[in-house]
Image: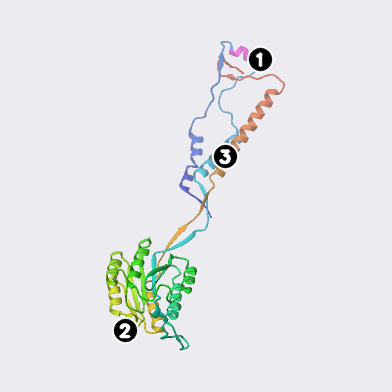
Amino acid sequence: MWRLEYPWLLAAAPLALAAYRWLPAYVQQRNALRVPFFDSVAAITGQSPSRPGVRASPGQLWLNVVVWLLLVLALARPQWVEPPLTHTEAVRDVLLAVDISQSMDTADFRNADGRPESRWKAVKAVVADFIAKRADDRLGLIVFGTSAYPQAPLTGDHVALSLLLERTAVGMAGPNTAIGDAIGLGIRMLDAAKERDKVLILLTDGNDTGSAVPPARAASLAAQHHIIVHTIGIGDPAASGEDRVDFGVLEGIARATNGQFFKAEDLASLQSVYDTLDRITPQEVKTLRHQPKRDYFWLPLGLALCLLAAWHGVAAMSAWRSRRAPGPRKGRTEEGDAWTST
């Protein structure tokens, strides 16, 4: 679409008419020889003296009008504005911390057909669905067992993230459970992010057995860094040893960081947990708009210069031809007693 950057400058167009109407005409000064017998010389030579002034030239008048209008148009800065380009950026980082300790191989979940399947297979399917729904968020993945590892950095490339999730297997990070270390790694990864909202979703089926930082201390650090931690427990609180999930610790972590604690006992409840998380952490995006512009002020400016150059070129050629033409040379007189030198 065409537009003028400074359309108010078009109001200067009538100034040319005002200047033509009220400003005095410009008369170029020329050298002249004054003689007391001016009238006698004029009579002898047969020439009639003329009054000095500006010779009327309709062509030059219209040229000046057109050039002025073109200059005003160039000052108004015509532009071609292309359709707006929009770009969206996420304003929330969501980090998924998933337990892949040995106990995640326990087949106590049932799929849609009622067949038993391992906890990890059920978790992987639900997390993959959650990733697919968060198209506008930057997501990352932490896996933890005996230690915590960044499986995928915070990224908007959800295809690569889903592929890394698919290739994650139980036992890759060791047989034990390090919840505190997973939260500590999440703090480091989210601290490097620049987004406004930072969320860590932690899922485990056991209790902390060997973290360098206790879970309560890690939760306190997360709160200081303005990170919300939602916790999900899917294990058996009545089990013994490392297979027993400590819902109290998970609930304390969520409470300390203004998050929520969820208990998932089967596939349906696990899916419900992630649906709830999708509602309480709605997607937010920042939309950036840009309209590319191309300036075309040079077109009227260049046309005005070409018209002036062509006009003066033709005038110069006509003057050159008239000087070469044979015949008596005519001088110009001034009123009174002066003879113009030629």
Q: Of the two numbered discs 2 and 1 on the same chain, state the one appearing first in sequence.
A: 1
In whole angstroms, how far apart are the C-alphas of marks 2 and 3? 92 Å
Label 3 sits on what residue type? Answer: Ala
The residue drawn where x is 63% and y is 32% is 313
Q: Residues within 10 Å of mark 2 (few under 14, many from 20)?
A: few
Out of 337 and 73, give the one closest to the viewer: 73
Q: Which is in the foreground here, disc 2 or disc 1?
A: 2
Determine whether the residue tagged by mark 3 lies in a helix, strand or loop.
helix
Mark closer to the chain start, 1 or 3:
1
- The residue that appears at 30% across and 67% down in the rendered structure is 222
- Residue 15 visible here: yes
Question: Callout 3: few (<14), some (14-19), or many (20+) C-alpha neighbours within 10 Å?
Answer: many
Which residue does the numbered mark 3 point to in the structure image?
A: 304
**Res 119 → quadrant:** bottom left
Residues in magenta? Answer: 38-44
What percent of the width, then of the height, locates residue 79?
A: 52, 50
Q: Amino acid at mark 2?
A: Ser
In the displayed structure, does residue 66 sit left or right of residue 194? right
User: Which residue is disc 2 drawn over?
Assistant: 240
Q: Position of residue 210 (x, y in %)?
A: 32, 73
- Give the labeled residue for mark 1: 45
- Name the quadrant of the C terminus: top right
Q: Can you tell which of label 2 and label 3 is closer to the viewer?
A: 2
